[in-house]
Image (cartoon, coloured by chain):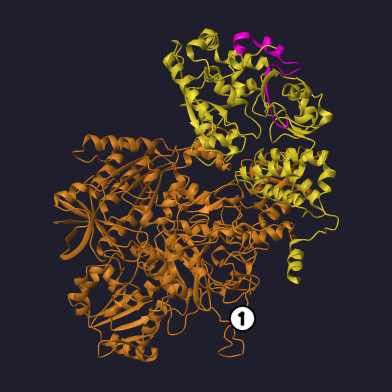
Amino acid sequence: MATIKIDGKQFEVDATDNLLKVALSKGFDLPYFCWHPELHSVGACRQCAVKQYKDEDDTEGKIVMACMTPASDGGCFSIDDPESSDFRAQVIEWLMINHPHDCPVCEEGGECHLQDMTLMTGHTRRRYRGPKRTHRNQDLGPFIGHEMNRCIACYRCVRYYRDYADGDDLRVLGSHSNVYFGRETDGPLQNEFSGNLVEVCPTGVFTDKTLGADYPRKWDMQNAPGICTHCSLGCNTSPGSRQGVLKRIQNRYHGEINHYFLCDRGRFGAGFVNREDRPRQTLVRADNGVLEPQDMDAVLATLKGVLTEANGLVGIGSPRASLEDNFALRHLVGADNFHNGMSAPDSHASTAALSLLREHAGRLPSLREVESCDAVFILGEDVTQFAPRLALSLRQSVRNRHHELAEAAKIPKWHARAVRDEGQHHYSPLYMAVPAATKLDDVATELFHLRPAAIAELGFAVAAILDDGAPMPAGLDDATRAHAETIAAALKSAKKPLVVAGTSLGSEAVLTAAGNVMRALESVHDDAGLFVTFAEANSVGMAMMTERDVDDAFEAITRQRADTLVVMQNDLYERAQAARVDAAIKAAKNVIVLDHSMTATIAKADYVLPAGSFAEADGTLVNNEGRAQRFFQVFIPDAPLQEGWRWCADLQRALGAPVRWQGMDDLIDAIETECPQFVGITDAAPSTSFRKSGMRFPRSPHRFSGRTALYANVDVRERRPETDPDSPLAYSMEGHYTSDQPPALLAYAWSPGWNANQTAITRFQDEVGGHLKGGDPGTRLLKASGDVPAYAPAEVKRVAGWQAIPRYHIFGSESQSAKAPAIQERMPERAWFTLNEASAKALGMAAADTLRLTLDGEIHTLPITIDPSLPDHTIGVPVGAHGLMGVRLPAEVHP
Amino acid sequence: MEKVLTKNIRDDREPMWIADYEKADGWQAYKKALQEMKPTEVAELVKAAGLRGRGGAGFPTGVKWGFMPRFDEQPEKRPTHIYMVANADEMEPGTFKDRLLMEGDPHQFIEAMAISSYAIGADIAYVFIRGEYTECQRKLQRAIDEATEAGYLGEDIFGTGYNLKIYLHMSAGRYICGEETALLSALEGRRAVPRHKPPFPAASGLFGQPTTVNNVETLCNVPHIINHGADWYKTLGLHKDGGTKIFGASGHVARPGLVELPLGTKLSEVLDYFGGVRGGKRLKAVLPGGGSTPMLTEQHLDTPLDYEGVGAVGSRLGTGTLVVMDESTSMVGVLKNLEHFYAQESCGWCTPCRDGLPWVERMLADLEAGKGQPGDIELLDLHVKLLGPGKTFCAHAPGAMGPLESALLYFRDELAALIPAEATTLDSTQAANAVSHH
């Protein structure tokens, strides 16, 4: 700790921080551009100039850049000093020499850091008389708009893109006053985290193209605290809407999970909400076989009959739907008839992975903590494609070596370029045992391209080397033993080792091996961590709810134990091979689907009830670390579209059965009562009745405009504000909005003078880049038991011949985002089977030849492409909207 | 006067190759250093001689070497590599002295690099050389090859266990590469953007390893200090700063060129060597050490040209190569030309330099074109102040402000007179409105 003085006031600060971070954390309005809490200091923009005095008697002082000045004990500084504030205004005048005055037509206007800083410095009058330089803009793909004329050359974009996200195709070109931030040629930005440029850029150079098509101002948007539904990590989002149209996804700061950054699937994958082809009416299959809209009450009346006459109900839930929606369906069909909606292999893997979480509940680092792990062993997961945001965190973890070297060289941790110059290409160990090349390979210490069984074997061996008590797999070859010894040594000597495994390969053996590694590591290390990835946003929640999977549901139908199928937000064709789904649907007398998107299952359904997506509903999701998090309705949909759980309640009422819940609070109580494994979800966010100063919490900024005119074309009288029966949020700009906002209810970030999302959030943090005041939201449901788990036997079942394994793609493998137009543009153009050269030769094939592959009795035909990284006799199968759906992998095949 | 640095250089510039160089006592200093002296003793000797950097900044070379970490006590802590880098990216406007040394006596320079590398414990040395200096490159490469062949470079040199390799790196251009940390960035294959100090290159330099960067002329002094000692070296200078200096002159002198003279020789005497101001005209101003040194005028003709002497009259010795302007010179033209150069050569990293210098250039262009407005001179004053040391990221913009500051001091009336009497101050909005009313 250190004591410093800023403008005569004394502060206790962390001496290892720089002055800018300290000043912002203490609430000072000090302008800056090139600094960012995650990118740290480089001293480029010269905007954060302050006066530094030698001591209290020094009246002269000298101008220093706060970002490059350590907050050393005894430091004496002034922000208000006229010389430094004049200098700061002058810096803005310089930056404004070339900045176009196009704010009125700029997407960034109203949440522009440059606007904020210009106002903050007080620069108003332009003295430069010359022309402005102009640039040609580039087409950077479907995600990001590019308007280089607005650039103020703060270098944040390239520092984020290249130095933080390890992207290669955005760079600074040119020099002097003609620097250019772009690609060498037009084309989509290739990095999976490019969308963060939108928020990292302090002005309107890089903008959200999906928003830019038809953008409202930030102050005109209606937002809600959201949870991303496109993978299992549970990144916090802030979806923004205007008049019932979802406009964009912004990052919502969570100090333990995503902090400032999202992946592109999360940011640009929500476009499915606005699709024209979504079911928005209650639909009934007419006699001519076509689904036709029918009045909601009439459909409910019909369904009353259907359900009453049903000879047994089968409910299929969904790992992409909330606990509430799933529980309501479970309640409707009965606990014994409810299924988790996962494919059989995914359900088995998820259940195994959940037991791992339970066994090591005290040692599950958050995504943020992953960044501080200094040795990582990944078993099986292609994280960039399967749990994308994790890849960005792992990229920071390997740079811990930079920080170690910098510390030894007495370079402060915030001195970003010096840390990098010192660190060079030295990375902390990252060992990856995966079936094929991944997007993380560039920072890996060593790669082992293995089939699932061999990955498990390597894992078992690592465990056995770490702890004699762990079983060694039989017949281990020398090479594998040597690899295992290297990995074990790296994990053991690390300060904070991390084991990463997950369900993507559908291999329980890999998960079991990861468990042994973790158990062995715990015996020699106090700070070992386990990070487990799952397929979908609520995979953990569904694994916790029931182990019954889609196959069990089909069996109940085809064995005629029941004849009516109720499906909640799920496309069964993603969960099992088409023939089995067809058979089940055919066997069922009635198929009722509640969903927000058009699916192959809806195409076969008898009744369709339009259910709310995340934007039109409240709910709770359990992420990969067992953290229950609440998301809230962004806008009220037009009837009859309503929450899945409301539909279930309606159906239950139609049946004349009592419904124990009226709204979210009762429903959450009911979940906790009937499913005690979910006790704690109440605390994920304040309840409906929660108020501060007697007020609700606004969804819109206080300058929200047009409220009285929005619906004037319908009725000139101003509408009453809608009342939210399910949350303490208000459909209004009115309400309680201060820096002590309950973090789970922070629909958008704004603070006086700070309109940009990533800067406004500062006032809601305990320190810049730290935790949210009042604690980062969400409740960890899994508690450490204290029991030391037993080692699993090191048994590996090998496939002798050909094996097909799943290959994922960030754009396409997740079904909801795959319906978003922007994501569709970035999906792989073609689906391929991948195999290595030798395997292709063994089949007598060459690249682009067509391979017929029988998987689970179904023939799939795709061209092949050579991926030299795959093991021999291994065929990579693209899974998802861009490839094959419903295939059961890994599988032994006979090509 | 005794020639030191240029003693081997012939008028036709054909250098002494290794046999002749050795006959002229070449490579003797290197042998002496490696066989008789410890690296720290070499560094101490250079420090005692008071050798100061000839690249422009004038930092004491021995002191700089003293910043290098030593691993004699803990050889196991020695980093993978320690680097010596010669800054041969001679791009200061009006400066061409290092070229003479490299073209005229390449072995002297390579020997100097080898001794200096030994002094700081470097095992790899790079010559970062200006891309246009192809003749230097050809000759230096031959000297390196000959020295390697002769066993002066390589592994276990003279059986002492000392290893050294010297590589030439041809710069892709940019004035900023002359800034030592920008040079290191460029050498690493990155953009030539300066680094913030601390950390200094001695702590974290090329590829993050301990590194010293020295100017060519600076290094060329080292063999002579080894051969003749610190006391001898000190006597070479006329005042406090020891040694000789390659002075040069370009611009309005009768005979532009280079000459080796004792440090501390008066400005008037140096000018006389080049035949004085061309055509018998009066001297208007002189940039004493390259484009980024504040101007001197007639009143400074008695100034001794050494670090202290020039510093005392508000300028810097810089590279010691004079740019001479006679009385017919348009000062605003000189300034516009200089500021154009510095604006173009800004790396674009920090705001004041990137966006301030083009504005300065534009104001000067306006003044020259008779489009100046009241307030322009004051705005130039403001830039001199705000583009000063500490406010910008590196010394590029402060250097660019050197000549402007001195011109605003010595030629203020001339500059102010360029503003038309009827001109009024318009801000951009007023200017736009004025246009639209027409």
**Observer-nearest of A404 and B7:** B7
Q: Position of residue A812 (x, y in %)?
A: 34, 63
Image quadrant containing the N terminus of chain B: top right
Q: Looking at the picture, which amino acid does disc 1 mark?
A: Arg
Identify the residue at horizontal 40%, vertical 56% (top origin).
Answer: A388
Query: Which chain identifier belongs to the orange chain?
Result: A
Image quadrant containing the C terminus of chain B: bottom right
**Observer-nearest of A646 and A273:** A273
Q: Position of residue A304 (x, y in %)?
A: 32, 88
The residue that label 1 is drawn on is A707
Q: Which residue range is magenta in the image?
A: B224-252
On the image, which quarter does residue A593 sit in? Answer: bottom left
In the orientation shown, which residue stands out farthest toward the front?
A: B279
Q: Total label count?
A: 1
Asked if residue B73 can be seen in this view, the reply is yes
**Observer-nearest of B326 and A503:** B326
Name the secondary structure under disc 1.
loop
Is residue A678 covered in magenta?
A: no
In the image, taking residue B302 as reference, residue A699 lies left or right, namely: left
Q: Position of residue A6 (x, y in %)?
A: 74, 47
Q: Is residue A281 above or below residue B307?
A: below
Q: Chain of mark 1?
A: A
Asked if residue A683 can be seen in this view, the reply is no
Q: Is residue B192 above or below residue B304?
A: below
**Observer-nearest of B333 and B302:** B333
Identify the residue at horizontal 40%, vertical 65% (top origin).
Answer: A823
Q: Position of residue A98 (x, y in %)?
A: 64, 57
Q: Which hue is chain B drawn in?
A: yellow
Pointer 1 local density, CA inside 10 Å: few below 14, some 14–19, many at least 20: some
